[in-house]
Image (spheres, coloured by chain):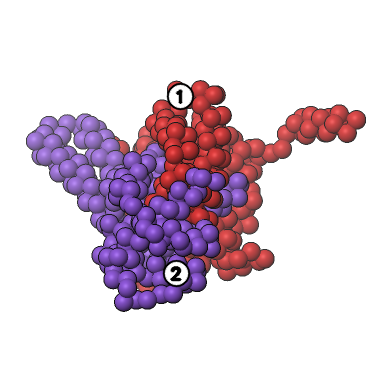
Chain colours: A red, B purple
């Protein structure tokens, strides 16, 4: 077989295949079932032309051309199902909570990484506030004089609330992304993000309690804090999952192990974004509102917590009815 | 070791390949993207500052929340553009961003399929780490170590950046085939050659030369080299002084023509 002959014989087929590829890429709706069938046929025929060309004349331009149309149609034919509304709904009700439960151990570890330094530093600043200068990070230390004057900074003026809300929201999302991305450095950056935030929040709470304004701060934090901290822990779990896959790949190669963990972790981190938007809205509008009494704010925290944790631990569990249906079908099959 | 090609085996058991993008072209694409990002954000921020200054008095007088809401919206928009630019374009443009499109690059999955939404989010969130400590320090180091020029984000997402496959069409192929020139008169010497001793690989080499000789700087030297190979295969005596470069090229064309004739006579 010579290139000239191959071109003469198959040119019409290839041109048609090119047309179908173009059609499928730009206006998928106009594809008829006949077009799709034809695309598959032409793709297979072009693949065998490519195999022949690679064997007989690998350096001829026609081989490069065939390589290109086979690659383009291969990408079309074997592509995954596109993002649909149904898939997004399924993500909310099943994929996200199920993935969360598979990573639950990392969630608890992330929580402890935050809580242990938080409680330790909090106790320290409560008992001995002078230590706060050494225990707290530099940019948090500028808050110390204000706390010593028994002033809270949480009284955000009404006109600033939308601004504060969006600032806090984006900042929290940034921290979550960092905790996730930090996993790729063997989890070290994730570790740092968790501990750092634990130290800051624990330290400030301890210090404010020492000066008698702690309850005020807690009242401010409680409404949005339950969601916010849970989400930060989820982001931490996502990062730790990647880091752990890197350190302990088990029977997989490190690269494959990290790839798999990242595919799970990204499911978690995507879910963090809408949750942080909710937390940010509460933090901007409910938390600083002076008209709302403290029991209501605690109530908001408790309610959001119950809803969130019920969702995380209960949603998308295997349905008993589905199970019996599946059994029945299996039974029928075996009969 | 650096690899130039990503080989994919299809379920039909045919292998094809993608040319892997190097650091240079990826740098160019990223430069364009960051330029677009920078300009867009500058326009938004400067524009809103302009608006705020223009109406600062009305904003300051009343306790109106409009100013706050306005700033909040700008804040969220800039944040979303910053983090979402690459993710948005790579998902909606099938692995391309404006910069990648300009340079002719595409992000694909390692198995040759379009990168999934999850993978795109992974590789672009990990951009933060690849960017550490400054301007893609970590990313560059991993790209130098990795034979397929993949940065950390690509490694975790299972993606690779390749040159887009739209660089040659059938008309170009035909044109380059036609440069073989007009039919030549096949000389007596070529007619007597035992051409049947040549196998497909020799013919392929000959075809490759004829198709590409216009792009070659040293095409006459290559012609001599290939002709010598064919002579050895056919057990003919090779006398370099008889074959000046020009004659070698002509004779290759004659051999090709004769082979084509034989092929069609089958």
Image spot of residue A334 (x, y percent): 88, 33
In terms of secondary structure, where does tag 1 sit?
helix
Residue located 46% across and 44% down the image = A5
Is A286 in front, or is A58?
Answer: A58
Disc 1 residue crowd, few under 14, some 14–19, many 20+, Cα 10 Å: few
Q: CA distance from mark 1 to mark 2?
A: 57 Å
* Residue at image mark 1: A29
Q: In the rendered view, does A273 fall on the left or right side of A113? A: left
Image quadrant where residue A209 sits: bottom left
Image spot of residue A141 (x, y percent): 32, 65
Q: Chain of mark 1?
A: A
Tell me: residue A95, above or below residue B17: above
- The quadrant of the image that shows the C terminus of chain A is top right
Q: How many marks?
A: 2
Residue located 46% across and 58% down the image = B203
* Residue at image mark 2: B231
Q: Is residue A72 visible?
A: no
Foreground disc of the pair 1, 2: 2
Image quadrant where residue A97 sits: top right
């Amino acid at each position: 077989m010579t290139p000239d002959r191959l071109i003469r014989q198959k040119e019409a087929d290839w041109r048609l295949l090119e047309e179908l590829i173009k059609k499928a890429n730009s206006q998928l709706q106009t594809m008829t079932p006949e077009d799709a069938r034809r695309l598959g046929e032409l793709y297979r025929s072009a693949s065998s032309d490519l195999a022949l060309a690679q064997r007989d004349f690998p350096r001829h331009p026609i081989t490069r051309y065939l390589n290109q149309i086979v690659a383009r149609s291969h990408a079309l034919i074997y592509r995954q199902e596109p993002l649909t509304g149904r898939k997004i709904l399924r993500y909310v009700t099943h994929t996200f909570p199920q993935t969360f439960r598979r990573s639950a151990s990392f969630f608890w570890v992330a929580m402890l990484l935050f809580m242990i330094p938080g409680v330790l530093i909090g106790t320290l600043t409560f008992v001995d506030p002078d230590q706060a200068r050494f225990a707290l990070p530099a940019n948090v230390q500028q808050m110390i004089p204000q706390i010593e004057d028994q002033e809270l900074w949480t009284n955000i003026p009404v006109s600033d609330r939308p601004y504060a809300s969006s600032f806090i929201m984006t900042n929290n999302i940034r921290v979550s992304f960092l905790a996730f991305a930090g996993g790729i450095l063997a989890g070290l950056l994730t570790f740092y993000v968790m501990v750092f935030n634990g130290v800051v929040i624990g330290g400030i709470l301890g210090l404010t309690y020492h000066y008698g304004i702690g309850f005020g701060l807690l009242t401010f934090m409680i409404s949005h804090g339950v969601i916010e901290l849970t989400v930060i822990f989820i982001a931490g779990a996502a990062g730790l999952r990647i880091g752990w896959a890197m350190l302990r790949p088990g029977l997989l190669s490190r690269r494959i192990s990290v790839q798999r963990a990242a595919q799970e972790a990204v499911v978690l981190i995507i879910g963090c974004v809408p949750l942080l938007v909710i937390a940010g809205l509460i933090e901007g509008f409910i938390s600083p509102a002076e008209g709302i009494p403290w029991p209501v704010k605690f109530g908001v925290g408790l309610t959001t917590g119950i809803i969130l944790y019920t969702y995380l631990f209960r949603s998308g569990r295997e349905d008993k009815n589905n199970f019996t249906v599946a059994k029945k079908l299996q039974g029928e099959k075996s009969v | 070791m650096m690899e130039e090609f990503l080989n994919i085996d299809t379920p039909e058991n045919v292998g094809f390949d993608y040319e892997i993008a190097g650091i240079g072209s990826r740098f160019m694409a990223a430069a364009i993207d960051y330029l677009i990002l920078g300009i867009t954000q500058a326009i938004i921020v400067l524009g809103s500052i302009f608006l705020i200054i223009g109406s600062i008095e009305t904003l300051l007088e009343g306790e109106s929340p409009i100013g706050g809401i306005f700033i909040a919206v700008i804040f969220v928009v800039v944040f979303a553009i910053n983090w979402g630019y690459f993710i948005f374009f790579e998902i909606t443009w099938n692995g391309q961003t404006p910069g990648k499109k300009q340079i002719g690059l595409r992000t694909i999955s390692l198995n040759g399929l379009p990168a999934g939404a999850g993978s795109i989010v992974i590789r672009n969130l990990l951009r933060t780490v690849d960017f550490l400590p400054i301007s893609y320090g970590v990313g560059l180091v991993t790209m130098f170590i990795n034979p397929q020029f993949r940065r950390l984000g690509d490694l975790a997402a299972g993606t690779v950046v390749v040159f887009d496959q739209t660089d040659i069409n059938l008309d170009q192929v035909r044109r380059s085939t036609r440069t073989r020139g007009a039919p030549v008169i096949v000389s007596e010497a070529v007619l007597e050659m035992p051409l049947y001793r040549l196998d497909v690989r020799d013919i392929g080499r000959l075809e490759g030369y004829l198709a590409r000789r216009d792009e070659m700087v040293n095409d006459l030297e290559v012609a001599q080299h290939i002709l010598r190979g064919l002579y050895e295969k056919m057990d003919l005596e090779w006398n370099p002084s008889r074959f000046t470069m020009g004659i070698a090229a002509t004779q290759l064309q004659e051999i090709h023509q004769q082979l084509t004739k034989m092929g069609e006579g089958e």
